[in-house]
Image (spheres, grey):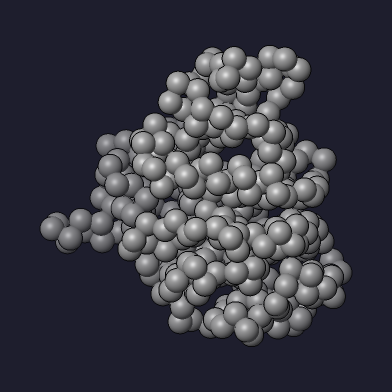
Amino acid sequence: MLGRVLKNRYKLIDERGRGSMATVYIGRDLESNRLYAVKVLSREAAADSELAERFQREFELLKRLSGPHVVSPVDSGEDRGSLFIVMDYVDGHNLKHAILTGGPFPVRRAIDVVEQSAAGLVTAAEQGIVHRDIKPQNLLLSVNGVVKLTDFGLARSNESRDITVTGFFVGTPFYVAPEQVENSRRADTRADLYSLACVFFEMLTGRVPFDGEHAWDVVLQHLNNPPPSARALRPELPAEYDVFFQRTLAKKPAERFQSPRAFLDAIEALPIPERGTTAPSTEPPLGVMIAGNGQTFVLTAPEMVLGRSDPQRNTRPDIDLLPLDPQQTVSRQHARMSYRQGKFYLEDLKAFNRTRLNNEPLVPYQEVEAHSGDMMRLGNVELRFEVRTR
């Protein structure tokens, strides 16, 4: 698609992101020379009448929204079998990228991002629109600090005919509200606020509230497990933060804040801890590896092997990367992480696809010190390494 001109006007000059049903490009308007974000539905999805209807509905819903924290639609159409939507281009990255590359946010910055995100939900709620897929990937951070809510592909309004694939819930497992799992038609603004609370928890702690190896494991935790403690992961947070999450991550919608404005008021009332208010931890640091999908792996022993499980050979590494590697490019015993005298080390175990640290291949059986922010690559699996205080 790169280089193609849609509607004799929008030239696709770069790819910005790709999903299961659509790809987002940077497009140049040949009439005004302005840059826009152009979302193009895949040909396979466009051939499905319901998915095509959902895509066209996204543009209609966006036209009803007007606010500084929601992306603005510009145009839509069809060109040689390709359905597309043109939107304002946001110069920056999505929130997921910022979390993975910047670690847990300073509290004040996390509050600013979640407040702007909630303001976007205020705009949607005033038009009776439920987003149903609030997650860091759908929150854009511009270079000037403005947060914009995007991707209304799963959204519905009070008047919409619901389009849901039978047997699947609508949303993303790490951020989905319990009622949205049980029946996506029941999801209202309170489900969006639940998802935003999950995002806020991740910004503060670097971890999603509920995690697991498989999507359904995560979903079951949303349905059954009590909200975790943010203070257990970040001790300097005041007790009010755990109280906030107990309410915003309540299983029953009636027990949560009932509107984005009430959610905003509660955010604004949270105290911001002063730096240096807690004594430094005397416990050893924690080594954490974060995958691109947000899944985290914690080093819980002085030495741990990373690899791919193989039940037929009775191979079970300490950290199993098989769920992230369906093509099995990771060896059964691929690499070893070690911790000694305050330092972390990565060692390649003569894997078929060499272990790489910051894109440099490691010599087998030679330890290399790993630092916070380093990128590790095992086969096709990329992990960001972080050192955290307990």
Q: State which quarter of the image contains the C terminus.
A: bottom right
Q: Position of residue 189 (x, y in %)?
A: 64, 68
* Residue drawn at (74%, 82%) of the image: 239
Query: Residue 267 placed where, x, y %?
Result: 79, 71
Q: Nearer the viewer, residue 94 or 155?
A: 155
Along the viewing direction, whichever of 50 and 372 lies nearer the viewer = 50
Q: Is residue 288 above or below residue 239?
A: above
Is residue 182 visible in this depiction of the protein?
A: yes
Q: Is residue 352 above or below residue 236?
A: above
Q: Residue furthest left?
A: 312
Q: Is residue 75 left or right of residue 340?
A: right
The image shows residue 361 at horizontal and vertical percentages of 42, 32
The residue sitting at 70% across, 77% down in the picture is 258
What residue do we see at 42% from left, 63% from top? 169
Provide residue 69's location: percent of width, then percent of height: 76, 50
> Residue at horizontal 37%, vertical 67%?
216
